[in-house]
């Protein structure tokens, strides 16, 4: 087949830099070690490197405005002036101080005295997961009198910045309908879509300026199109793009959908007044036929054929077969090729990984390699298969090698999977009976205080880990260092009066990686960082094969820490659903099967911990909600195997052993039945940013088990005072009985500094004691 050149697009690329340059620049700026100019210079250098890299690899449709100092949804809030009054902004350009206050919160002395903030400073805006990914966005806040104004020219400035360097780019914006649907109002009855007519003039202003400066296309991301939409939202989409087409006819819009099928929104999508439509053919290959058949003849279709969410290498010959069929039907002038979504969600460059098993490495592709795959596809489609015969042969060979590798399949794991029965899914007694036994065993006060598990990973802890990894510290020296840190943390918790202690997790690099490194079937990178939020980056494990537990993973550190105190000390584990959802997961078996394999391994650990004397075992399922499919029709299936996995790993213990779990930011209304079905004795959840509103689901459901709603936000450097925490606890008491309530932070404290953690936990203990005194 011989065609003219097919445009190759990327939709967006990682922002963080190959060596985490953005993280270092941000944290230096936040610590006062560098100034705004230095931060912005680093950001500009990263943008220039991204554009240059894509150009050199063969990308012909290069994005701009896909870079962000913190979050692209926050950037959109700032662009349109959706800035709550508490941050002290009234008009004009938005400062970095205000921008980061929205993301991270601010102490009172971080702002001008006349800015109107509360005495304790400005809390950060709520943060939640970006669709079903592990990326977090800052939730926009709206009210019925909301006005919008162009308050940041970032999309325009970054387009001109690229142009000055010789790159004609396609600017990327969050679409106006998705932006409104991602936000929230203090009044739950208020629909943010009612603000659409006020918002659209700002988008018109941005598009007009981009057109005046030479932009030919703009990418508007409307991933809401893969959700279950009502007629009002579909109408909002039609009105939006009709209005933009009328007001800015000189610019073409590529409407980008991703993370799934457009499904029953397809008729709406195909009638929108846009020049192009991007579709995800990795998550939803089945939608191609309908789009090819029904799309109008002048609509450009961007085919998302390389996986932007996972790290597996494409089987290029198989992809080419599908592309050639699609192009034959659509016509060569109507096609672009692209990843399924922005490459934000994958690491930057596989070639940085020098220590990966060669077989595993041969099966992988990171952002740079995925762009290379797209460029290869474009060349072959333009010039024929002989143009890249060796590359295509290697791609197909890697796919066959992975499929047949003995490192992927384990007969013993298959045997254990076949032996799972109902007795492995049930606790011995219902919760009411277990609670009675546990209260007698522990004798805890009302409002028992605890933490979620981790304590600050200080510079000293990180340096010791690095020294050990590089051979500059012996195993004995490293273990002694960790014992000193653990003992210090245990003593400090006793000193401030926490009721249930933790060991601090100083030996753990990451809550998923630590366990993955001790399980079969996982591989790990050294430079495979992806952004979770802000400067919080993670290196997701790569789940490539069957999972088993060769030996105990957390037992010895729990034993050591418990030997230092007579207070109960929780053993800390990460649950199977979270390990699955926070890993790059194999795509050759169902996710449910992989999750059950992990559950059996965690079950072994739980049983060993109980035999060693552990009385409380916390199995974190921070990512349970995150894995929820975007379409409600698929929820029951997912929640069925997710809950089943948790119960398999947690149900092998006696009644008097208390099982805890923890969940991060979630819309709990969506999954409250599943949470109840998990049957954990105690669940801790993040609720402080929502002012305990997330507990409404538990109140309505009459949730019977015990709950620790977070009473302060650990994602912000703020230190809340006793009164603020008491106010939050009072809100929790309006929704739950005192007998149900535990008092704890929102999440683990690993990313915070001791200077923040110490006063915050002291205030938390004081708040609980003051409430006990009057209860």
Image (cartoon, rainbow, N blue to C red):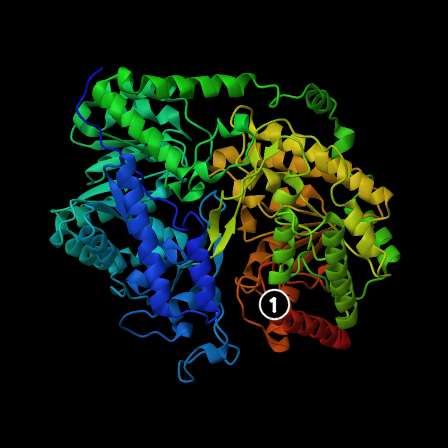
- Residue at image position (75%, 59%) is 486
How far across and how far down the image is residue 130, in percent? 44, 48
- In the rendered view, does 635 fall on the left or right side of 278? right
**Residue 187 seen:** no
- Residue at image position (18%, 21%) is 3
343 or 578: nearer the eye? 343
- Residue at image position (31%, 57%) is 44
How far across and how far down the image is residue 689, in percent? 53, 63
**Residue 468 seen:** yes
Give the quadrant of residue 721: bottom right
**Is 250 rendered above or below residue 524?**
below
The residue at which mark 1 appears reads as 731
How far across and how far down the image is residue 339, in percent? 35, 34
Circle 1 — which element? helix
**Is 669 rendered above or below residue 636?**
below
- Characterize the local packing of mark 1: few (<14), some (14-19) or many (20 or more) Cα atoms within 10 angstroms: some
């Amino acid at each position: 087949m011989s065609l003219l050149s097919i445009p190759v697009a990327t939709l967006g690329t990682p922002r963080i830099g190959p060596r985490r340059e953005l993280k270092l620049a941000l944290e230096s700026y936040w610590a006062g070690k560098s100034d705004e100019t230095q931060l912005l210079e680093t950001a500009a250098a990263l943008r220039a490197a991204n554009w240059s890299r894509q150009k050199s690899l063969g990308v012909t449709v290069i994005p701009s405005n896909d870079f962000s100092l913190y979050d692209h949804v926050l950037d959109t809030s700032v662009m349109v002036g959706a800035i709550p009054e508490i941050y002290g902004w009234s008009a004009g350009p938005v400062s970095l101080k205000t921008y980061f206050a929205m993301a991270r919160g601010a102490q009172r002395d971080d702002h001008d005295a006349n800015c109107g903030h509360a005495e304790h400073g400005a809390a950060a805006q709520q943060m939640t997961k970006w669709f079903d990914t592990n990326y977090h966005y800052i939730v926009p806040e709206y009210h019925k009198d909301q006005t919008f104004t162009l308050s940041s020219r970032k999309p325009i400035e970054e387009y001109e910045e690229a142009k000055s360097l010789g790159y004609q780019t396609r600017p990327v914006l969050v679409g106006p309908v998705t932006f409104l649907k991602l936000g929230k109002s203090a009044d739950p009855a208020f629909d943010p879509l009612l603000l659409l007519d006020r918002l659209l003039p700002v988008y018109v202003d941005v598009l007009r300026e981009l057109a005046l400066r030479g932009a030919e296309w703009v990418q508007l991301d409307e991933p809401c199109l893969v959700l279950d939409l009502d007629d009002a939202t579909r109408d909002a989409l039609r009105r939006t793009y009709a209005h933009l087409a009328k007001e800015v006819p000189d610019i073409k819009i590529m409407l980008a959908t991703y993370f799934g099928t457009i499904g029953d929104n397809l008729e709406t999508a195909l009638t929108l007044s846009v020049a192009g439509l991007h579709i995800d053919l990795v998550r939803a290959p089945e939608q191609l036929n309908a789009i090819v058949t029904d799309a109008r003849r002048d609509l450009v279709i961007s085919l998302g054929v390389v996986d932007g969410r996972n790290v597996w290498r494409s089987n290029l010959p198989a992809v080419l077969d599908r592309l050639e069929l699609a192009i034959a039907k659509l016509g060569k002038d109507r096609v672009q090729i692209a990843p399924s979504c922005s490459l934000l969600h994958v690491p930057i460059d596989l070639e940085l990984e020098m220590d990966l098993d060669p077989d595993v490495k041969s099966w992988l592709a990171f952002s740079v390699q995925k762009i290379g795959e797209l460029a290869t596809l474009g060349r072959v489609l333009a010039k024929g298969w002989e143009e890249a015969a060796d590359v295509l042969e290697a791609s197909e060979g890697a796919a066959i090698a992975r499929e047949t590798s003995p490192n992927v399949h384990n007969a013993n794991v298959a045997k254990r999977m076949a032996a799972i029965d109902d007795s492995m899914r049930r606790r011995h007694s219902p919760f009411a009976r277990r609670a009675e036994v546990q209260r007698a065993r522990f004798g805890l006060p009302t409002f028992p205080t605890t933490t979620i598990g981790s304590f600050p990973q200080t510079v000293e802890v990180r340096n010791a880990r690095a020294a050990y990894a590089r051979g500059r510290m012996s195993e004995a020296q490293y273990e002694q260092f960790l014992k000193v840190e653990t003992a210090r943390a245990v003593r400090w918790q006793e000193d401030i009066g926490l009721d249930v202690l933790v060991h601090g997790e100083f030996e753990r690099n990451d809550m998923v990686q630590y366990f993955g490194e001790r399980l079969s079937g996982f591989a790990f990178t050294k430079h495979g960082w992806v952004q979770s939020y802000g400067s919080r980056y993670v290196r997701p494990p790569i789940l490539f094969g069957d999972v088993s537990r060769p030996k105990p993973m957390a037992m010895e550190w729990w034993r050591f820490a418990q030997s230092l105190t007579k207070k109960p000390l929780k053993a800390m584990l990460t649950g199977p659903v979270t390990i699955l959802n926070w890993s790059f997961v194999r795509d050759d078996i169902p996710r449910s099967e992989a999750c059950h394999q992990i559950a059996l391994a965690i079950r072994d650990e739980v049983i060993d911990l109980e035999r060693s004397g552990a009385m409380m075992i916390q199995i974190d399922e921070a990512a349970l909600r995150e894995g929820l499919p975007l379409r409600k029709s698929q929820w029951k299936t997912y929640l069925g195997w997710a809950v089943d996995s948790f119960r398999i790993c947690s149900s092998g213990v006696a009644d008097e052993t208390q099982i805890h779990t923890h969940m991060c930011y979630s819309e709990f209304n969506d999954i409250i039945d599943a949470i109840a079905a998990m049957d954990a004795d105690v669940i801790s959840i993040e609720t402080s940013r929502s002012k305990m509103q997330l507990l409404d689901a538990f109140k309505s459901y009459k949730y019977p088990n015990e709950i620790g709603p977070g009473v302060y936000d650990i994602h912000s450097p703020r230190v809340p005072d006793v009164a603020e925490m008491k106010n939050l606890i009072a809100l929790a008491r309006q929704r739950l009985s005192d007998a149900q309530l535990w008092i704890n932070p929102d999440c683990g404290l690993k990313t915070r500094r001791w200077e923040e953690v110490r006063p915050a936990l002291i205030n938390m203990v004081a708040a609980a004691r003051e409430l006990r005194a009057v209860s």
